[in-house]
Amino acid sequence: MKICVVDDESEVRVSIIQKLTALFPHVQVFNTEFGYEALKRIELIQPDLVFLDIRMPELDGLQILQRLHERYPAIHVVIISGYDDFEYARRALTHGATDFLLKPTDRGELSDIVLKVKSMMEQRFLKELDQLLNIAPISHVSLDKVRTANVSLWFDEREWKQVELLDPAAQKSSSIPLHDILLTVLLDVDLEAIVFRAPVEHTDRGFREKKDFLPVLHSQIRMKKELLFFQKNDPDLPASRSDRKDHAKQAVRHRQAIIHLARTGEVGELEAAMAKWSTCLKKISYEDLRKECAHLMAVLDEGLGKSDLIMVDEDTLYYWDEWVGRHHTWNDLIGRVHHMVLNGVKELKNLDQQEREAPQANGWFKQALQVIASSSDKNLSLEVVSEAVNVHPVTLSRMFKQQMGITFVRFLTRRRMQHASELLLNTSKKGNEISEDIGYADYAYFRSLFKKEFGYSPSEFRKKNGIMTAADETE
């Protein structure tokens, strides 16, 4: 925090500065004289808080207050006066003063004011961050995981701030002075993001303006995930973007070949195609790799119809993208994908015989429906249910398509949306809390799915049913 003290009496300024420095050693306190010189220094420093004498030569406190309120409305101004003058206090508050103190100010009053302003700044910061997250949400970044330190850095867009991702067990954050730390936020991948004042500009890891914070954080998370994902495999990733794009195009062609071979049931050739596809995946970005794997699994989930051209819907792709994201290393993911595809195709070849045994199939399928109905696990998955009834996930997915007319993923999505509608009607929880409760970290995506299912956004749904909360009004 930066504080300026303005008074035409030098001894008064020094007294206030000494008290503030003793109370808050990490706060920057500036002796900014009085009159036009004070105004010039305040404009240069752009403090968070100004203690301002009301009766001074050149410019009185009310004149300076009015100019600051017009040019820098975010600056908190506390008027100090040797006179118990109600009219001055009223005019000061009318012109935007945060508070009014009488001389001589004691430590308790100064401490209360600084803590009050600090709290107001933190609330304003969290509100602005919440607005940014509503515009461009990042999965698993939420306000309840944010810990603030020196939020003054957020409001000074001249300061260069750097974003780094650390293991929560690491001690680096403790080596950075507290007054240089803006915030820390715990992420979903056993990582902690720390944002701090940087002496040197790193354009790929830093920002000045508020609007650039989330894009930089998102970029850092993406790069860190890629590094962690590949670290045990140590792949030789191409340096250029054009190389990665070429390998991504090859991966798409190999995926299309896999789909064709999976449909025709040629297991030997399928294994060779999977190997070529896997080689390409190691040479593309982590984000493209996720999309590739999710798309292949989504097509397999749709059941491999008679045509190589299979359309998959948005929620199926989202489900499988989340599934891919739960695998934290290359070997873990690719081993699981190979198992699902190769064993899945073998299962599909035997499915005709299983379908002829209708009573047995109907028995385990009813059991699968019971598992879903009785589960409160927000991370319930195709694999979990198929394991519970002792069938392959592909078999369960195919049976859903035949018995219910929709895929397992679509069935699960509808069930979650129904649960969300009940929570909206019967609880006062916010939309983003309900989204988390039913298994969607991305509120914007949940909102889109809900509107697709019911024709209304969550807040509109509540309003339609005669329910409205303060949180819904800001959606």
Image: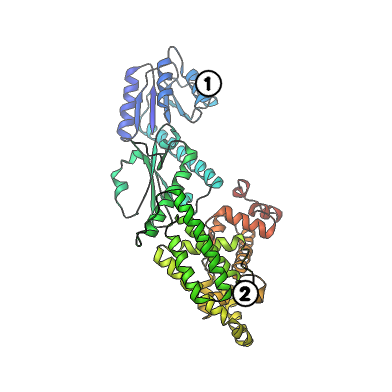
Residue topped by disc 2 = 400
The earlier-in-sequence mark between 1 and 2 is 1
Amino acid type, callout 2 = Phe
Which residue is found at the position 46% from the left and 42% from the top?
Answer: 213
Which-is-in-front pick, marks 1 and 2? 2
* Residue 51: x %, y % from top left: 41, 26
Q: Is label 1 in a helix, a strand or a loop?
A: helix
- Which numbered disc covers residue 87? 1
163 or 415: nearer the eye? 163
Amino acid type, callout 1 = Glu
> How far is the residue under mark 1 from the one under mark 2?
76 Å
Which residue is found at the position 62% from the left and 55% from the top?
Answer: 448
Which residue is found at the position 64% from the left and 69% from the top?
Answer: 307
406 or 445: nearer the eye? 406
Is mark 1 in CB contact (under 8 Å) with mark 2?
no
Q: Can residue 183 be seen here?
A: yes
